[in-house]
Image: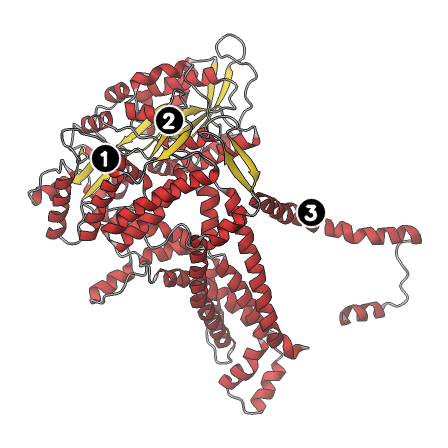
Amino acid sequence: MAQTATRTRQKPGAPPKTSPRGKNAKTRILTPYAMLAPAIVLFLVFMAAPIVYTLFLSFQKKKVSGLGLGKGSTTQVFAGFENYISTLTDPEFGASVLRVLAYGVILIPLMLGLALVFALLLDSRRTRAGAFSRTAIFLPYAVPAVISSLLWGFLYLPNVSPLLYIFDKLGWAVPSLMSPELVTFAIANIALWGGVGFNMIVIYTSLKAVPSEIYEAAKLDGASEVQTALRIKIPIVAPALVMTGLFSMIATLQVFAEPTTLRPLANSLSTSWSPLMLVYRDAFTRNDIYSASATSIVIAAATFIISFLFLRIVQKRAFGQEN
Amino acid sequence: MRYSFRAGAAAIITAAALLATGCSTPANSPEAGGSGSGTPVELTYWAWAPNLEKVVDIWNQKNPDIHVTVNKQDGGDPAVTKLLTAIKAGSGAPDLIQAEYQKIPTLVSADALADLSGTAAGGTKDSFPAGVWDSVTLGGDALYAVPQDTGPVVFYYRADIFENLGLSVPTTWDEYAAAAKTIHDADPSQFLGTFSSNDAGWFTAMSQQAGASWWGVDGDAWSVNIDKEPTQKVANYWGGLVESGVIDNQPMYTPAWNTGLNTGKQVGWLSAAWGPGVLSGNAESTAGKWKVAPMPQWDASKPATGNWGGSSTAVTTQSKNVEAAAKFATWLNTDPEAIKALVTETGIYPADSAGAKSALTAPPAFFSNQPDFYDVIAKAAATVSNFTYGPNVNVAFSAYNDEFAKAAQSKKQSDFAKAVSNMQTITTDDLKKTGFTVK
């Protein structure tokens, strides 16, 4: 705002470039729309239309007459709220939500905690090999989730894992991470490995934006590195923490690639382990796009509500001192 | 099912090559009928069997009036998804498609497959084992596809380890259980087999052998017969073996299982005729040590076998040249020259009994120690039991994955029985929910 004001003040006498007043006004009205058009079209075609179609499908169902063989025996009919009721009363859906909540409780604090610690360490004045460490921590984020799940899957499986081989030779009885009790940790570990780097970069970037005068003042006041970190840096990066927290929560609700890739390797993961896996199974394995649409809408609505509530609760505290 | 994964890998490689030659679907030629002068009938064929186009080339050279173009697919599941989409859209489907047996009811229920009973393909019944014929007719009068290949299940075992332990090949399931115990007791890291919750097709074959037929048609109603004596018997048997720990409980086709085949931790494998391909790929260092035998039996006096995998050639309802397409499908799967080419080029086990016998003479390289390899397979193929697939095989199979994963994990025999009854409930509920009449 301030910048724009300065710029206009710099050339006070500049004449308007286009000549006739009426045409100018018309162009001025149309130009922003023309510029917005690509975004609006893309949004309508690739976001709004699919959402509307999903909404439509979620109120439909397949109706079969007779044996269901041959022409015209299968039709699509209006289902009312049937699909929604069956989604919300499906014990499998409830169980998958609970599993994902447990997964989030394990993953998010650990991931953000580690990301914050790494960011603070990299920002500390005594850091050596900062650029290398930053790249090393960030690199796993560049590995696609399917690939990293396969990598970790090999490390978890008893007969092929070099780690378990070493533990075995040392005589340590290490419990299998693919057992039903520990498989949530196994998946959280993959997400942690891939996610810490990204969140670390976000927090680190916001630390770099802090003016150095503040640190100098703290130093003059005799604050130690740890005190500077706790009293100054963490409160300043709180907005970044809120944002990474929100992203992590959404990613948690949408966890799909890791458990889907690990599933064929063990008995402990079902095809409905996470809510999105349930949607995938209904839509593509069971050919029931109608239930899958209803479940998708429920998940989307829940994600929206949770994000909104989270921001309402946290935002005041995080951004409070800025205003 | 499994076959398609294997073939899928090969298909990806071929698909890359096909990209260069362009793999768009040519429009169906307007001329109906088939033979005659003028422009030839153009047929498109969606298939994923490796090198199938080489077999089709033979047809194209001999039949200038009916030209078939193979359009490579990624595998059984994606091809069916694509076909269902094309059927829903009203255009874009090929004339012919390679369809796995368990997919046929789903495709028929979507009105995707043409009835071939009145065409050239109608007279091929005697070429195929009765169990296979049942899968393409769904037990009715219509004919929805011509069988191409099958996967009669046999028992692969490490002959050297059996010999060292003084074991004879199990001919009954009781003997199999005893052998499994002897092997596991001798070396606790070794297993005669594994119960795989990932492979519904495998368990279907086990149940089929025991006399199960999971679906049935009764007038205008479907019946679901999963939770019946044969399947319960099979589930209890494997549940008992898993509970006692003499059989492994981890899924097949994992890196751990592949390694187990190669290092001798997996000593036996109940698998289909296409097994040598998997073994030679995963267990190279054990070549020449394996042998094949018929499946262990429930009743030695009435030998029976299950079928794991295999596919057929079907004609779609969007084809404008059903007659010509049926003629080609019949040639491809029953003509001796075509079968010979299928065996050498695509490595399948033909469904045509006579064709299989004349085309398969030398054993596969991995089993060069067993000259009568294909005799064993042919005998098994002749005893494949009848089995009817229903319109929601996909639901039953995904229920199998989930329910038996829990049972295999808990290692309790009672959970195996519970998994069968849960499969029954899930499959029946799904049919009812869609509006099928279920008896």
Q: Amino acid at mark 3?
A: Val
SS under mark 1: loop
Q: Are marks 3 and 2 on the same chain?
A: no
Image quarter of the N terminus of chain B: top left
- Mark 2 Cα shell of 10 Å, populated few (<14), some (14-19), many (≥20): many
Q: Chain of mark 2?
A: B
Measure how far apart labels 2 and 1 are at the Cα level. 20 Å
In the rendered image, the vertical position of residue A111 relative to residue B374, given as above or below: below
Q: Nearer the viewer, residue B340 or A185?
A: A185
Q: Is residue A72 left or right of residue A265?
A: right
Q: Chain of mark 3?
A: A
In the rendered image, the vertical position of residue B223 relative to residue A88, given as above or below: above
Residue labelled with disc 1: B210
Checking the image for residue B343, the label placed there is none
Is residue B280 visible in the rendered image? The answer is: no
- Mark 1 Cα shell of 10 Å, populated few (<14), some (14-19), many (≥20): many
SS under mark 3: helix
Q: Are marks 3 and 1 on the same chain?
A: no
Q: Residue shown at 81%/50% (left/top)?
A: A30
SS under mark 2: loop
Q: Amino acid at mark 2?
A: Leu
Residue labelled with disc 2: B138
Q: Amino acid at mark 1?
A: Ala
For this orientation, the residue located farthest to the front is B439
Q: Chain of mark 1?
A: B
- Say which quarter of the image contains residue B339: top left
Which tag is nearer the camera, tag 3 or tag 1? 1
In the rendered image, the vertical position of residue B68 relative to residue B278, given as above or below: above
Checking the image for residue A41, the label placed there is 3
Measure how far apart labels 3 and 1 are at the Cα level. 59 Å
In the rendered image, the vertical position of residue A132 relative to residue A278, given as above or below: below
Is residue B156 visible in the rendered image? The answer is: yes
